[in-house]
Amino acid sequence: MSGVEGKELRVVGFLCNWCSYGGADTAGVSRFKQPTDLRIIRVPCSGRVDPLLVVKAFMSGADGVLVSGCHPRDCHYAEGNFYARRRLEVLKRFLPFMGVEPGRFEYTWVSASEGARWQKVVTNFTEQIHNLGPLHHFGEGDGSGGDR
Amino acid sequence: MRIGVFVCHCGTNIGGTVDSHQVAEEAKQFPHVAYSTDYLYTCSEPGQQEIQQAIKEHNLDGVVVAACSPIMHENTFRRTIERAGLNRYMFEMANIREHCSWIGEDKEANTRKAIELVRMAVAKVANNVHLHPSYFDVNKRVLVIGAGVAGMQAALDCAEGGLDVVLVEKKSSIGGRMAQLDKTFPTVDCSICILGPKMVDVGQHDKIKLYTYSEIEDISGYVGNYTVKIRRKATYVDWAKCTGCGLCMEKCPSKKAFDYHNEGVAYTTAINIPFPQAIPKKARIDPKYCRQFTKGKCGVCAKVCPVGAINYEMEDEIITEEVGAIIVATGYGLMNIEELGEYGAGRYPDVITGIQYERLLNASGPTQGHIVRPSDGEEPKRIVFISCAGSRDLSLGRPYCSNFCCMYIAKQAILTRDHIPNSDVYVFYIDIRAPGKGYEEFVRRAQEEYGAQYIRGRVSRVYPRGRHMIVKGVDTLLGTQVEVDADLVVLATAATCAPGAEELAEKLRISYDGYGFYIESHPKLRPVETNTSGIFLAGACQGPKDIPASVGQGSAAASKVLALFSKDKLESDPQIAQVDESRCIGCLKCAETCPFGAIEERELRDGRIVARVIETVCQGCGLCTATCPPGAIQLQQFTDNQIIAEVEALCQAWKERSSG
């Protein structure tokens, strides 16, 4: 089930407009090759990402969700990413109780200048999701994902 | 709703790895899509006209353009649809270039991805609502941070344009790095001779309010209306009285104070005026070295000062200024040369930095322009320059080129041979970077006319032998080891961000790169703007720059401010939070999380408490939206419904794909 074999998995990325979305743009402009699985949704700030949006994505069929914002202390909105960090960390610990392996969700910090870092983040995260395989959807699996 | 989809080929940029035509065909199936087409260059004039025509012909009320990044062209297309009579916010972009065609070579996978990105954008625009900007007054004053050559140019251009300028400088005199230089390349004209008059213009301009020896404490507000707190550090000298006579400097018994202007190659007195051309020409006490502060008794300067300007009790003062725009021109710093252990910098007195050498060359420097060895004060006969000392070095985490070193080494080589005609000058270099006007010719002159010996190769070690320094390196053109017996070694140390650059960026809410240099809006097309509206960049704070480039950027930033202030009222961005009063429970958790204090309490007529957004203060981050328990406060253009619609559209596509 790896990207190399040609089968894509379903990965959603919520990216802040100022740093990570710009970082993904920089990666594109620099032609840094990446797996094609990820679909990016632009949000103004990682602090805008309500943990429920992540849960919604998992419930609707995503195999992995990535949130990326500005590096701590470099937020366009001064402290949005600090809120993100607190909320998303709680979410990460809560996901196993929902039957979602914690490895299916990550939050990272990528600045607008870090195209190469974004390439690495996407590649690693996609690989991680491929290692986990498709998520058994609610009602389909045995709900034991939390043991991992 | 009737949505139009326009898929761009961007020549082969998108078309090469995405089947744009197929994307446009597939888009016809999406809900609400009334028209869909592909075009070679959607952003071109005929491309935009086609959108406008389609809006009229097909009676569209929402538009999706699948092309490049919205950071690039969202505004372009918003204006396009506005010209066709639509609300500019009934528009979304699907980024199928930066996030799709350019990062994968598999055309089939890319096309599928592009189709899904378009589907998400369609779902979002179907949930968009008409938004309308409101208008607010502009305070037509500008703050310039940093009074080096870039900041001074920006301040002068703004002032000449009729604006009131507040110029804040950290040091006690304006002038910046350029005031430290002896001569400037490639003309070898005297630095202070061309800078001095400019400094006087700044100092005497009635539109420029100068705060030297001051730092930015805090910045709040938004474009058009910033409130800036400036800390005027205590100088312990009443500048209203000080005449700059310099008597205190003559009599000060503490003569071993660190001399910042001379980069530590000489000492100065604890009370000092940094250099003869300083503006304002006022003395300041360095409490780290002043005996009155360190030992509790002295008071010599207070006794000799003819005007009684000395005040040991002085304290820092906080001043508040209101401005409408900010130009950041904080310049650069220099790497700590002690990081370069192999060159012995910091350990051996005869290994110095380029800027220290510049001070030795300078007629107003500590040696009146005589080149001497720091160790014994003798005139060196053999001088070695080492370029890229710290720059272009991945192992030190500085892969970038410091931009001006090649040129100042050539200049210093020329000046050295002028000052000491019988000297030998060696330059170790990796590449020579001289792309400016007259630059290459200048480097050639240093080699051919002045006999500087350029050796291509890195230096591995510098160590002392007797009274000399041995420079061991390699000549990669000859393929041999080289050893030069030098009297003095000059390192072209890497330029870094200015000290404290990150902290200032956090106060300004602008971004900086991994090295602390500030990031411009677009590296090519918006080089002096930041992503925070109303804040502009000039000079080396954005990356190492020489004088012509810094001056050019100073003027460019000033012209941006003048253009901004040419309007009496500015449009506010309506993409801000909005409260649904019927759902608000008045918990005001939103107000607690808002970093800008943009939410206030409001009592309805029935006595119920609800939240209210202060339109001009809200920056549109959406922290409140993610916080609100009943979801009553929604960030316009990024509402829960809009983001969920995107997620659902995407998941629907996945579901159809796996079943089909």
Image: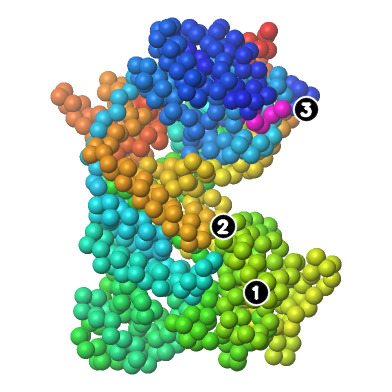
Please state which of residues B619 and B102 is positioned toward the viewer in this rendering. Answer: B102
User: What residue appears at the point 24 percent right and 37 percent down from the top-left corner?
Assistant: B569
Pick the quarter of the image with the C terminus of chain B. Answer: top right
Cα–Cα gap, marks 2 and 3: 47 Å
Location of residue B25 with respect to B306 vertically, above or below:
above
Q: Position of residue B178 (x, y in %)?
A: 45, 68
Label 2 sits on residue: B436
Q: Amino acid at mark 3?
A: Val
Q: Which residue is mark 1?
A: B449
Assess disc 2: are there few (<14), some (14-19) or many (≥20) residues with their C-alpha within 10 Å of its C-alpha: few
Count of residue discs: 3
Viewer-closest of B383 and A49: B383
Q: Which residues are magenta?
A: B99-105
* Residue B156 in the figure: left or right of residue B604: right
Q: Can you tell which quarter of the image residue B275 is in?
A: bottom left
* Residue A12 location, quadrant: top right
For disc 3, the marked residue is A4
The disc, 1 or 2, on the residue closer to the chain's N-terminal end is 2
